[in-house]
Amino acid sequence: MFYPIGTVKAVASKKKKSAQGAPAAARIAELRDLIAHHNQAYFGHDAPEISDADYDDLVRELAGLEADNPDLFSGESPTQTVGVAVVTTFAPVTHAMPMTSLDNAMDEDELRAWGERVAKGLDGASARYVCELKIDGLAISIRYENGELVQAATRGDGRVGEDVTGNIATIAAVPKKLIVKKGEVPAVLEVRGEVYMPIAAFEKLRAAKESENAERVAAGRKPEPVPANPRNAGAGSLRQKNPAVTAQRELSFWAYQVGDTRGVPQFDSHKDTLDYLASLGFPVNPAIVCVDAFAEVIEFCHRWRDSRDTLGYEIDGAVVKVDSLSQRELLGFTSRAPRWAIAFKFPPEERTTLLRDIQISVGRTGRVTPFAVLEPVFVGGSTVGMATLHNRAQVAAKDVRPGDTVVVRKAGDVIPEVVGPMLAKRPKNCKPWTFPDTCPCPLSTELVQVEGEADTRCIEPSCPYQRDQRIIYFASRGGMDIEGLGERTVFALSDAGFVDDAGDIYSLTEEQLLQIEGFGKISAQKLLAGIDASRHRPLPKLLTALGIKHLGPAASESLSFAFGTLDAIACASVDDLASIDGVGGVIAASIHSWFDKPANKRLVDKLRDAGVDFGNVERTTLPQVLVGKAVVVTGTLEGFSRDEAEAAIKQRGGKSPGSVSAKTFAVVVGAEPGASKLTKAEALGVPVLDETGFRTLLETGELPA
Ligand code: IVH
């Protein structure tokens, strides 16, 4: 996926412009106070009130104003300092060498500008760069004396941190004793790196906290804050007074820098120090690469921006460092950060915004889903105005209320979700939200919560909201793919009384369409042509379009290949249906009961009468060599169209998803392949095949030798 580069910058400069109206000095003072407040909340109390990205915007706005107004410079400004003085009861630790922060590049232009500053600082001499992932965790300094871990400290304000030795010692990835294979045991070695919580550990912790909260709420008690992301969860875990609690949290560690040393080998380059750390037993991230051309630096940054979700931990950017230690010395430091390194920040996946309202929507199967109506916010590469709240239990566990400031998360292509409220920002009169008892449709039927199910449902068969959603689904891209028949048109046709089910679509007339607002002769004829074309969709599309509960596109494909026609599927017994790979008892029972219902029988008859194709799939007799294997096709193949290649995989029992993941068996690459699929395959070590390899795979089910 590609993010619109420069969007964050646009936000920052928009704010800057609005500030220019007001006196710059007043805005600078206001920003310094605001940032100091958020520093205290974040570093001092592990209780941030805004997302990192919103915080970064404030710092960038301040830095911009300070650059434009050098007379208002102050060494005390948060742009010149790191973090805050520690306020907890952990013992203070003065760092042997300050733990500085990094300057940020928010887009490719800023990254190139840094590269040019480096070249200038080195009088045009070429530099080699080490490209690393920017781990979204907590910076830690760990000190070893004579090979033994003696102290670990947080960064704090960069000068003084907190002593968290006991807690760090519980982390399995952190060596307690160095492995020295050759040479001397170093008298002093301070290793710096990032402690982080893997995503799986975070999800486990969050699920446990949410279920504790559900019990609390059920017992009439107040829910406790749930960590919003792995970084906050990691910070909280590290600040535990009892190391036994930290030990349960499954924290991990990547080493990326050396601090104070005595009695260690003399190194010329950063890469050599990393290799040395790895030889002593420290985990050094395997994605780290050393490159000579700046184009490769940019490629690294973009590659990881697009495949960050393939890692089992969170990263919020890439860090690029000059490799040569003597060149680093030449470049030196600013008051806040080294000139020899830069953090390339990825677009934020989390933002804070106002929760305006909570509403419910009714799906095609009657499932009722609560969703958040948000003050629109740019997150994860797009503007988000609505986000799912999943179900009743989740709203209760998160205790989000209209009026709250909430954390919104959108990672990759997933549906945006509300992570939780910022309790510190909750307005006083903010009331808990209660789930409605009745369907929002005009029939106002009572909603039911099925015993043992998380979902709340509207079970009224004639619910007009469900009916509209079924028609929308029927016409959608995954179903009959009827161009021009989107949500709005379906609502209008349904309000006008022209459609009662999806079968009625095929008897719509131009005259009727002209009565719908927004339709003219041309658009009406276009829609009718789109409807007409959909009569000849392949059987798996038609079967999916019917919207049978639990039946998705993959099982529809398998059933179509196995039975050949819709009528054969409609007549099949539950056992026959369940015997097909990828179908199983639940789907089979759902299909069987769907075809048994009178309303659905009427729909099937209408579709037949309308001339919709009920079976154009050859029953397959091919050996099922690809059962359980996912094969992704990208680019143009000579002997197969894309549809033919995918059908060939599916006819052999395999799956052909649209994107690469760790579970992908192989990626078949033709001419002009999609860059992100190839990159992802390489990053995940998924085998890549050409057309000849693909033919072998189809024949044998195995990768070519
Ligand atoms: S190097 C003087 N390398 O990012 C250089 N930092 O925004 C010190 N971070 O405080 C840092 N991954 O907590 C470095 N590969 C990496 C990193 C990394 C994450 C964090 C670190 C630092 C912050 C700066």
Image (tube, rainbow, N blue to C red):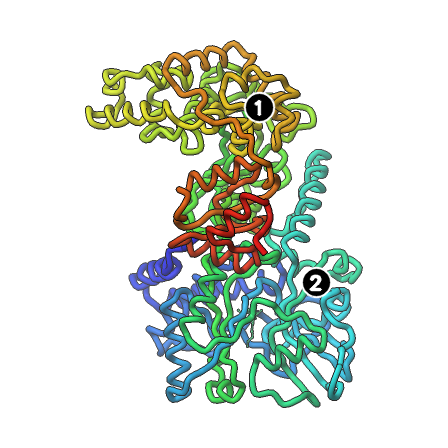
Q: CA distance from mark 2 to mark 1?
A: 43 Å
Q: Residue at x 52, y 61 (%)?
A: 316
Q: Are marks 2 and 1 in contact (CB under 8 Å)?
A: no
Query: Dot 1 corresponds to which residue?
Result: 457
Residue 121 location in percent, x, y? Answer: 41, 86
The local crowd at label 1, few if under 14, some if 14 to 19, many if 20 or more residues have their Cα within 10 Å, is many
Helix, strand or loop for disc 1: strand
Q: Is residue 636 above or below residue 96?
A: above
Q: Nearer the viewer, mark 2 or mark 1?
A: 1
* Observer able to see residue 202: yes
Q: Residue at x 68, y 66 (%)?
A: 88
Task: Name the mark on residue 703.
Answer: none
Residue 302 location in percent, x, y? Answer: 44, 62
* Observer able to see residue 51: no
Helix, strand or loop for disc 2: loop
Query: Dot 2 corresponds to which residue?
Result: 239
Residue type, label 1: Arg
Looking at the picture, tell me which residue is in the foreground, 502 or 700: 700
Quick check: 523 left or right of 456? left
Question: Which residue ends up furthest to the left in the rendered image?
Answer: 521
Residue 466 location in percent, x, y? Answer: 48, 22
Residue 255 location in percent, x, y? Answer: 64, 72
Q: Quadrant of residue 497?
A: top left
Q: Residue at x 45, y 14 (%)?
A: 603
Q: Is residue 627 above or below residue 692?
A: above
Residue type, label 2: Arg
Q: Locate ligand 1 by image quadrant.
A: bottom right
Q: Which numbered disc flags the more N-terminal residue, 2 or 1? A: 2
Q: Residue at x 27, y 16 (%)?
A: 509
